[in-house]
Image: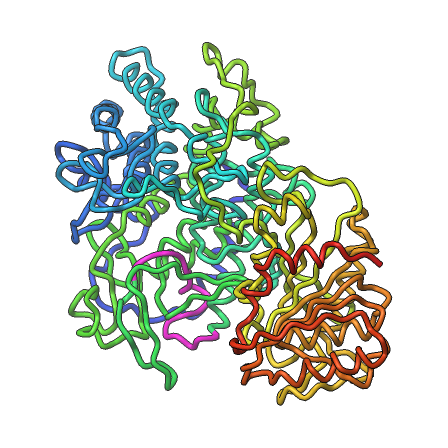
Amino acid sequence: MRKSPLIFLLVLLAYYAVSAQTQPAPIGGEKLLFSLDEVQKRHFLYFWELAHKTNFQIPDRYPTDDFSSIAATGFGLSSYLIGAERAWITRAQAAERVLKTLEFLKNLPQGREASGVAGYHGWFYHFLNTQTALRYKTVELSSIDTGLLMAGVLSCMTYFDQDIQTEADIRKTADYLFRRVEFDWFLNEQNRLSMGWFPERDGFLAADWRGYNEAMILNIMALGSPTHPIPAKTWEMWCEPYFRAEFKGQDHVNFGPLFGHQYSHCWIDFRGIQDPYMKKMGIDYFENSRRATLAQRQYGIENPGKFKGYGPNIWGLTAGDGPDADMLHEGKKIFCPGYGARGVAIDYQEDDGTIAPTAAIASLPFAPEVCLPALEAMWNRWPVGKYGFFDGYNETFTEIHRSPKAQPGFPFWVDKDYLGIDQGPIVLMLENYRSGFLWDLMKRNPYIVQGLKRAGFTGGWLEKTDLKQLSKGISFADGEKATTNPTIPLDQQGFFQRAIYTDNTGYKLPYQLMTPWQGASSVQRPTSNVPLVIFLHGSGERGTKNHEQMRNGVHAFCEKWVREQHPHYLLVPQCPPDIRWGGSSKDWQTLYQEEPTVAGRQVLELVAKMLREYPDIDPNRVYITGLSMGGFGTFDLMMRRPDLFAAGLPVCGGGDPRFAEKIKNIPLWIFHGELDDVVLPRCSRQIVAALEKVNGEVKYTEYSTMYHDIWNVTYYNPAVLEWLFEQRK
C-alpha cells in the first residue's frame, strides 16, 4: 500500500496523537525495542522455524504440539513469500520450502476412508496428525480451512513466475492442488457451501457459509475454479443474510470477532471494488472492515464489562485462546473459555476480558491511526516471546494456578501458546499495510480475478485488469451448469435475513425475514399474490440480538413441502426486553389498552412498510400467529387492525373477551394445552366463548394431555398450515 507523502504525514500525525494518550505501565517479560520489522519478523519465524522437518505442515499451536493446521499451513505459504521480499530468507530458500510443502500435500492420500487419508475430493481435513500429516482423530473435512490453505497455494503459484525448474514445478503443483478441489461437491440446495463433511456417516454439516464472515475468499475461489466452479448465484445467496446495523457509531455489515473482517483481506485488496450489495450500501468491504475496527475500539474504550487494561490502546476481540477457567469479577462468576470466538457486534457480545493481539494488529491496514498505537502499546506493555505475541492476555484473570493454559510468573493471565491462524494474519496484514505486496500479487492471479468478476465485483483495480491476458491457456468450466449436492442437509436458519426496523422516534425492532424465493433451488420465485406470515415469539425469547426469537416453532414454516406448496414471506420480529407485544400483563390477565405497546406498534408499522416495498405480497393474505406472549400479541394486533389480517393462529395465549366483536370476521384457529400451568387454558376459553357468542369464525383445539409447550405439535401439523394458507379476506 504505497502512500503519498501527504497521506503518510496525516497517518503519522494521527498515530502520535493517539499514542500520546496515557499508556498503562509495562508489565514483566522480555522488553524489546518496538519496530514493525521486529514484530513482523518474529511472527514470520513461527512459520519458518516451526514447520515440520519432513512434511512441512505448520503446527496449530506452539509449544503445545497436538496436530498441524491446514489453515496455518496456508498462512505459512504466503508468509514465506513475505520473508523472501523482506530478505529474511532468500527467494531460493522460500521456493525450496514451498515446493516441498506443495509436493507433500499433493502426494498425501485422499479417499472416503475414516483414517489413513488427509482429504477427499481435493479438500483437506481441518487438522492433520503432526508426524504423519493424516487426518487427526475424527475432525471434519473442512471447507474454510481448505480455502485458507488454497489462498496460500495460489499466492505461491503467482509469486514464483521465473523460468527456472523449481518455480515452474511450484506453479504446476499449486495449479494441480487448486484444480483438484471439488467446490461443487460441497454445494447445498440453497447454493451455499457446507462447512464440513464426516466420513463416519458419509454426511455433510447442515451449517453452511452465508451472511458475511471469514469465508468471502472461499466463495470467491469457488467461483473462480477452472474445474469445479459454483454458480454465480451463490454470491447472491451468500449476501442475502447480511446483517447491516449501526454499532458503536459505525454503520456496517456486522460480524462479532474481528477475524471475520480480516481473513479474506489478507489476500484480496477490496479497496475501490464493489459487489452489488456494497454498491447499494455506498462503500466497499475495506471500508466495512475499517468501521468494524473502529467500533471494536470504541467498545474497548467504553469497556462495559469493566475489565482491567482496556482503553484507547488496549483492545481487540477475536477468536483465540483464553484461560479455560472461572474467575470472580464484579461480584459475578465468569467462565473464560479456552479457545473461543470472542467479539462484539450489534447481535453478538462474547467478552471475558481476554484480548488477542492479532485482533487490532491484523486491522492495521484499515485504521492505522488507532491500530499502530495499539500495536506499540501492547508490545511495550505485555510479555512477548521468540515468535512475538502470545495468543491471548487477560489482565483481569489473576489466579494463574487455576488456568491450564497460563504461563507462570506473571501477575495476570498470559497464554502459554502461540496460535498459527492468529500469527498468520499479523504477518500478512502488516505486509499489506507496509507495501501492499500480497494485494498486488493476488491481482495477478486469474482464479481470484475470475471469482471476483463472477461474484459481480466491479470498479477500481478490477476494471484495469485484463482477465484474458491473465487466463492465457486456461479453460474455465461453466459454473452455471454446476449442480447442487442433494445429500447435504439444509440449515433452516439459513433461510432468513436479519435487519432492524427503526421508527421515527428512534426505537429499534430487530427482525428476521424469510422471502419466498430464499432457500432451495427447487423453489421458484413467485411473481405475485404471495402471503405474508407474522410470527410473534414468547416472553422467554425477548432480547436485542435478533436470534433468540427463532427457538420455538418458527422453522415449521421452512419445511420443504411448505416452501414448495405455499411460498410465503415469514416475518419474525424480536420484542425488546421488559415490554410485551400487547394484550397481556405480567400475570397473564388479558388486557386490551387503547394505546399499543411500542413493540406492537412497530410490528404494524413494519408490516405496512413491507406491503409498500414488496408488491408481490397479497394484501388479502396477511396472516398472524404467535405463541404464549405472542399468542396474546396475536389477539391484540388483530383487535387493533382487523382490516389487515386474513387469519389468526394464536397458540397458548389469550385475548380480551370484551373486544371479540372487533375480530369476529377474521378466521381463527386457537390452540391451548389443557394442563398448561403457565398460561391457564381459561385465557383461550374466554375469548373462544366470546367469539362464539358473536358468531365469530373460530375453531378451538385443546390438547387434553399437554402442558404449555404445544407449539411444535401445532405448527408441524400439516393440517394447521394448510388451513392457514387457504384463508383469504
Observer able to see residue 251: no
Residue drawn 41% across the image and 49% down it: 362
- Residue positioned 80% across, 69% down in the render: 697
Q: Nearest the camera: 696 or 683?
A: 696
Q: Going 33% across and 57% down the picture, which residue do you hit?
A: 320
Camera-side residue of 695 and 337 = 695
Residue 519 image offset from top left, x and y in percent: 59, 44
Residue 36 drawn at (x, y percent) = 35, 47
Question: Is 707 on the left or on the right of 665, as rendered?
Answer: left
Image coords of residue 259 (percent x, y): 42, 51
The magenta stretch spans which residues?
304-321
Any magenta on residue 315?
yes
Compared with 484, 283 (above or below) is below
SS assignment for the magenta stretch, majority: loop
Is residue 411 positioned above or below 204 on the image?
A: below
Left or right of 411, for residue 190: right
Q: Residue at x 27, y 51 (%)?
A: 419
Picture layout, residue 168 above or below residue 276: above
Q: Is residue 438 magenta?
A: no
Quarter where residue 127 is shown: top left
Q: Is residue 469 visible?
A: yes
